[in-house]
Image (cartoon, helix red, strand yellow):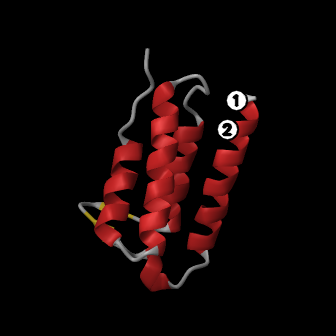
Amino acid sequence: MTGNLSKNLFGAVALATLALSVAPASAASHHRGGISCGGDNMAKINDYVSGLPDGDPNKWVAVKEIALANTALSESRDGECAMHLSRAEHIEPMH
């Protein structure tokens, strides 16, 4: 069951990433604090998060941060988007 949930969440993030990659250039260039909210960074961070073990609670925290980043970007809250992407990027697996 966790596998299906994981696939569904990452599928949603992948669709959002695809939508961002075809968005106008102005939407792809939103950034603050050194991280961009464009499709390339979304894809890079999504790949990193999808590599975390499914049973790792930090993976689900990162998935939530990516979802929040997507929402913020769609609502033109650039700084908030960058903050959530940065948080997702810095989440490490539990040992």
Judging by the rendered image, the residue that carries numbered circle 2 is 6
Q: Tag 1, which secondary structure?
A: helix
Q: Quadrant of residue 55?
A: top right
Nearer-the-camera pick, 40 or 63 = 63
Q: Position of residue 88 (x, y in %)?
A: 41, 45
Q: Is residue 60 above or below residue 88?
A: above
Residue plotted at (58% across, 25% down):
53
Q: Tag 2, which secondary structure?
A: helix
Residue plotted at (45% across, 25% down):
93
Q: Position of residue 92 (x, y in %)?
A: 40, 30
Q: Residues within 10 Å of mark 2 (few under 14, many from 20)?
A: some
Relative to residue 38, is residue 32 drawn left or right?
left
Q: Position of residue 26 (x, y in %)?
A: 43, 84
Q: Position of residue 17 (x, y in %)?
A: 59, 63
Q: Is residue 63 above or below residue 39?
A: above
- Counting every numbered tag in the picture gives 2
Q: Amino acid at mark 1?
A: Thr
Quadrant where the N terminus is found in the figure: top right
Q: Quadrant of residue 80?
A: bottom left
Residues under numbered marks 2 and 1 in contact, where contact means CB atoms less than 8 Å apart: yes
Q: Amino acid at mark 2?
A: Ser
| Alpha-carbon span between mark 2 and mark 1 | 6 Å
Q: Which mark is residue 54?
A: none
Residue plotted at (40% across, 44% down):
89
Q: Residues within 10 Å of mark 1 (few under 14, many from 20)?
A: few
Q: Is residue 61 above or below residue 57?
A: below
Judging by the rendered image, the residue that carries numbered circle 1 is 2
Residue plotted at (70% across, 29% down):
2
Quadrant where the C terminus is found in the figure: top left
